[in-house]
Amino acid sequence: QLTPDFYARTCPRLKFTVRDAMRQAVQREPRMAASILRLFFHDCFVNGCDGSILLDDTATFTGEQNAFPNRNSVRGFEVIDAIKARVEAACAATVSCADVLALAARDGVELVGGPSWRVALGRRDARTASQAQANSDLPSPFANLSTLISMFAAKGLNARDMTVLSGAHTLGFAQCSLFRTRIHNETNIDPSFAASRRLTCPLSGGDSNLAALDATPNRFDNSYYRKLVARRGLLHSDQELFNGGSQDGLVRTYSFNMAAFAGDFAAAMVKMGNISPLTGTAGEIRTTCGAVN
Ligand code: HEM
Ligand SMILES: [Ca+2]
């Protein structure tokens, strides 16, 4: 029951406000498009797209931000907080943090050359968050293909959705500790790629050193899939999509058909954005994204 014109009368300039703020954020730091996209994924996969990941831990509240997949890893909170402040100034107590995040993720992708899509709106914000749920529902970079497929299936997303959404790794960076075993121990990897990654990610030390997830980390293109076909996937979970299994054919298609990737990605983002939203009078419209009202 989400709809793109949910705020047409209550906050008519909403999408321009978000777009403008995201343009500034991405101009300042191109990686922010990636970081906000990932933030949206990590929101939607834990209790649905309800802004739960945005809630800060306090002395009496433990939320999702310090769950293993998020701690020292997800970023961009200050950008969402700043956008929300501008939205509040224009339309007080009207637009949810969950919707701001959904719009910002779409705008970031478009700003770095990716497809666009209509964001259905009307999500409300959670009053709670669960660190345990974040630990159990977010996929690990060490997962194999069948685990990835079943974790997405648990969210109503099929294997094709999983493979095309993983194309988000056309943007952004990963830390050495999350791909070390792949570049040092695995055999389904291009040797020269492994050797060059080992230069900044040795067997010990450099845990937080960054490497790009594909060859063009600030450009939304299909090079992620071309790299998978060349056995140059950075994460173990990336290469699982092209390792003799059920997704090989789709990876190959996306590797030479950018239009198919772009179209399927947009459709799958809409689907991901529909994961169990709070609507109607459930939840609340948070005034500050980091804390319940
Ligand atoms: C298929 C399962 C997935 C796994 C196992 C996975 C895992 C990871 C890991 C380990 C990182 C690096 C984190 C770090 O080094 O701190 C990462 C980065 C990223 N992920 Fe995923 N991811 C998956 C799917 C997705 C999906 C569905 C999206 C969005 C639709 C996404 C968007 C991103 C982006 C954009 C980055 C780069 C973030 C940045 O540079 O700030 N990922 N992912
Ligand atoms: Ca959530």
Image: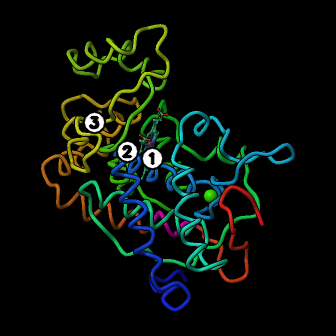
Q: Amino acid at mark 1?
A: Ser
Residue 71 % position (x, y): 61, 35
Mark 1 Cβ inside 8 Å of ligand 1: yes
Q: Amino acid at mark 3?
A: Asp
Q: Amino acid at mark 2?
A: Glu
- Count of marks, rendered view: 3
Left or right, 169 with respect to 71, comes to left
Query: Residue 35, labelled with which disc?
Result: 1
User: What stretch of residues is rendered in magenta?
Assistant: 271-275
Residue at 72 percent across and 44 percent down: it is 132
The residue indicated by pointer 3 is 214
Q: How much space separates mark 2 and mark 3, taking CA atoms?
A: 18 Å
Instruction: Check residue 96 for magenta coloring.
Output: no
- For disc 1, the neighbor class at 10 Å (few under 14, some 14 to 19, many from 20) is many
Tell me the quarter of the picture where residue 188 sits.
top left
Residue 32 % position (x, y): 41, 48
Q: How much space separates mark 1 and mark 3, taking CA atoms?
A: 15 Å
Dot 3 falls on a residue whose secondary structure is: loop
Tell me the quarter of the picture where residue 117 sits.
bottom left
Give the image quadrant in which the ligand numbered 1 is located. Answer: top left
Dot 2 falls on a residue whose secondary structure is: loop
Query: Residue 29, labelled with which disc?
Result: 2
Farthest-out residue, front:
89
